[in-house]
Amino acid sequence: MKRAAYILVRNPLSLTGVILITLVVFGALFADFIAPFPEHRGAVVDFANFNKPPEWPYLFGTDLVGRDLFSRILYAYRISLLLGAVVLAIAVPVGVTIGLVAGYIGGWTEYVLMRITDVFLSIPPLVLAMSMMGLLEPTLTNGMLAVTAMWWPWYTRLVYNLTRSEKEEGYVLAAEVIGASRTHIIFREILPNCVPSIVTKMTLDLGFVILIASSLSFLGLGVQPPTPDLGSMVADGAKYLPDSWWLTVFPGLAILVAVFGFNLLGDALRDILGVDQ
């Protein structure tokens, strides 16, 4: 903890990332108490206050049916963070397990698993997600599945390279000499030494998952109205630029803050955990 505090104090950008993500997570978790108009997250219409520029009590203005943008952005953060957490909770175990097995066992197992991984890596992530969402109903669950399908190969490639390096270390050779099983060596010896790199990448990827999910929603393939979503809010507001600029600027800034914050937080964790790559 002392080392982490020292690094954060010495690096203003890392401290900025921690502050930004703390604010984003706090706002998402306690949106029910922070949002000035929590009922505006749903199908609410208030034509008396429609399309108002930023002013009190509408800090970020209102949309075309009178809903408070600040309140909807807070709830949109909740959706985005939930999507990112679920995607990584599925993609990381799958990708890490495949990478460990391929890297340690080698042979035909390595060849088959890594060629499958290369096939997924050869397809642009957004294109793969768009293809899947084009075949599925555009719901939050299907959006998670689409993003998960494109995310696990990156962890497979990372852990595969780490495992290839770690399996030549003395502690692995010692475990083999005393007769430890492959399962023990993979998950009790090699995996703990890969955790710092995995955690760092997860932090960086949370921002990119939010960005990809927002891109799908921008194209109409993500979370559907009236559920608040940053990407769909940007898409709806873009039709009315530059007059109603707040409809696009504030949701866009919300995406920027989340992605920028997670990237800075990932850099901070890399320094704290001593990750080289």
Image: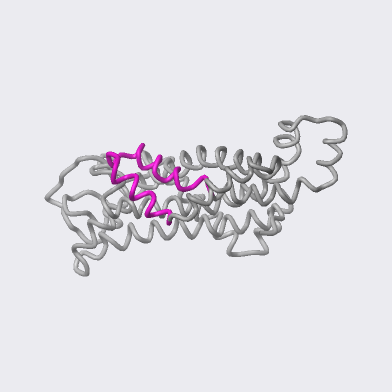
190 left or right of 97 in image? right
76 left or right of 64 in image? right
Residue 6 within the segment the image draws in magenta:
no
Residue at the left extreme, as displayed? 47
Residue at the bottom extreme, as displayed? 242
Q: Which residues are magenta?
A: 124-153
Residue 171 on image: x %, y %: 83, 42
Residue 60 on image: x %, y %: 29, 57
Taking depth in this image into account, of 47 and 213 the one nearest to the observer is 213
Q: Main secondary structure of the magenta part?
A: helix
Placement of 255 over or under 147, stated as above or below: below
Taking depth in this image into account, of 115 and 166 the one nearest to the observer is 115
Placement of 176 over or under 159, stated as above or below: above
Residue 144 on image: x %, y %: 40, 41
Quadrant in the rendering for residue 257: bottom left
Residue 133 within the segment the image draws in magenta:
yes
Residue 248 on image: x %, y %: 28, 61
Quadrant in the rendering for residue 75: top left
79 left or right of 167 in image? left
Residue 57 visible, this orientation = no
Placement of 43 over or under 252, stated as above or below: above
Residue 232 visible, this orientation = yes
From the image, which quarter does the C terminus lie in?
bottom right
